[in-house]
Amino acid sequence: MSRLFALLALVLPLGWGAPAYADEAPAAKTDNTEAAADDKPKEDSAVSHHSVTVGGTSIKYTATAGTLLIRDDKDEPTASMFYVAYTQDGTDLGRRPVTFLYNGGPGSATIWLHMGSVGPKRVVTSDAAPTPGAPYSLVDNEYSLLDKTDLVFIDAIGTGYSRAVGKSQDKDFYGVDQDGKAFTQFIQRYLSKNGRWNSPKFLMGESYGTTRSALLSNMLTRGGVALNGVILVSSILDFATESFNVGNDLPYIANLPSYAAIAWYHDKLTPKPADFQVFLKEVRGFAFGEYADALMKGDKLDDATRADVIKKLALYTGISQKFIVDAKLRLECFRFMKELTRDEGHTVGRLDARYVGIDHDNAGEDPEFDPADAYITGAYSAAFHAYMQGELNYTPDRDYHLFADTHDWDWKHRNGFNPWWPGSLDVAEDLRQAMSQNPRLKVFVANGYYDLATPFGGSEYTFDHLGLDPSLRANVQFGYYASGHMIYLSVPALKALKADLAKFYDASATR
């Protein structure tokens, strides 16, 4: 989701107001100490009470929408971070799990997870099709995780209602480590303010939010916060798996199983395999075997092997052999999105390839837009604003930013073990360190079959190369769903995800 939103501020010049007359006595000098104190950033909150039925059981809960301040080493406020917390009423806070949730980007607000996944409310959107216009429906979410954990949805600085304060600027937090430090401070502040240090603690991030989670797992561990579990929704930890740079063949290999799944979904395979899982197992074997070997040989690849690989690539992806030859055996993501259904005059989505879009013409190389993004954004935004005002009674005097301008994001990262080295970001080592220092920490990796933003093949490759001690490997679980990047856009997939996470919490929150 790469949109930019500009905020125009209207500032009245000093001195505007009622006119001053020459014959009036000058106003008495006042003490501005109290006024200056009033200008200091403050934490705010709006508290409301609700109930939701999950799994046939009515759950009474308290919703708190507000901000928490994070501070620098001089104890000066540097940012006000917005959150919405849902806490079940009448529970033992020392035993009740609490989960911190956020979206990614970097530079995306957490509106998507908040309004679509496991919160107590869910906006209704059309599955794999354009959502009709307003008014939109907001319903009780029977697949909420409130029966298992309290939920705290957090917006990154520069997104949502989160802003830098004092002498800081939003851009000061636009970086891997800067963002990680801010979230670490927020979580520690929330635990202290709400008496949750002894609660079982979980992280749930989506997309770049999984990158943040891997980093946070290490930062929080070093800061004295022992996590029970980390949930990675549509994960990317090693960015080399999605960096389509000349000379890097890894993303072509990692994307191939997703291409095959999407071609299967759109009936572009001849013949179409009857058993989806058996088919994907075959493609995985080819991708990380024969295909990987062929790409590694580069220009030394012999003609017979090249011809065999081209034939199989066409068979598995539905893309013509000529296109594959022209692309030198390497199918880049956006080319695949444009080419797969070009004969139908459509493109397929990146976030969720089940969605199809229509470009101005069929001659282009890349799609004009991502339909999986365009078809839902209006519904999420409208439902969120109505919900904040109508049910949570939170009406701040600032705009809610869906996205921040993070084009100058600082990708440098030092994980405390290895110094930063120029190249693609990789935070998998942070997660390995956290799991090694906290051997009871469990990880759940949720993947959508039709996700081209963070393909499941990349997640599998990353965890296969995590270097975990054999005694810890069973702490990692994978889940797969017939959906895309935002798994919850498919209600059947959301239902399956909830069932898997319920088991995960039961296993991770116990001693």
Image (cartoon, helix red, strand yellow):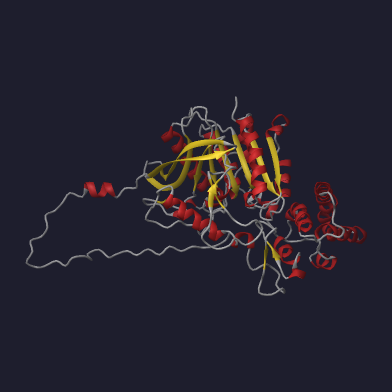
- The residue under the point 69% across, 31% down is 472
Q: Position of residue 35 (x, y in %)?
A: 24, 49
Q: Position of residue 296 (x, y in %)?
A: 81, 54
Q: Quadrant of the N terminus?
A: bottom right
Taking the image as drawn, is residue 71 in sight? no
Above or below, 27 relative to 51: below
The answer to whether residue 488 is left or right of residue 333 is left
Image label count: 0
Above or below, 151 relative to 309: above
Choose between 9 and 243: the one closer to the eye.
Answer: 9
Q: Position of residue 448 (x, y in %)?
A: 69, 49
- The residue under the point 48% across, 36% down is 60
The answer to whether residue 227 is left or right of residue 355 is left
Taking the image as drawn, is residue 197 in sight? yes
Based on the displayed image, in which of its 4 quarters is residue 214 positioned?
Answer: top right
Above or below, 312 relative to 501: below
Q: Position of residue 346 (x, y in %)?
A: 71, 68
The answer to whether residue 158 is left or right of residue 269 is left
Choose between 165 and 354: the one closer to the eye.
Answer: 354
Based on the displayed image, in which of its 4 quarters is residue 3 positioned?
Answer: bottom right
- The residue under the point 46% across, 55% down is 385
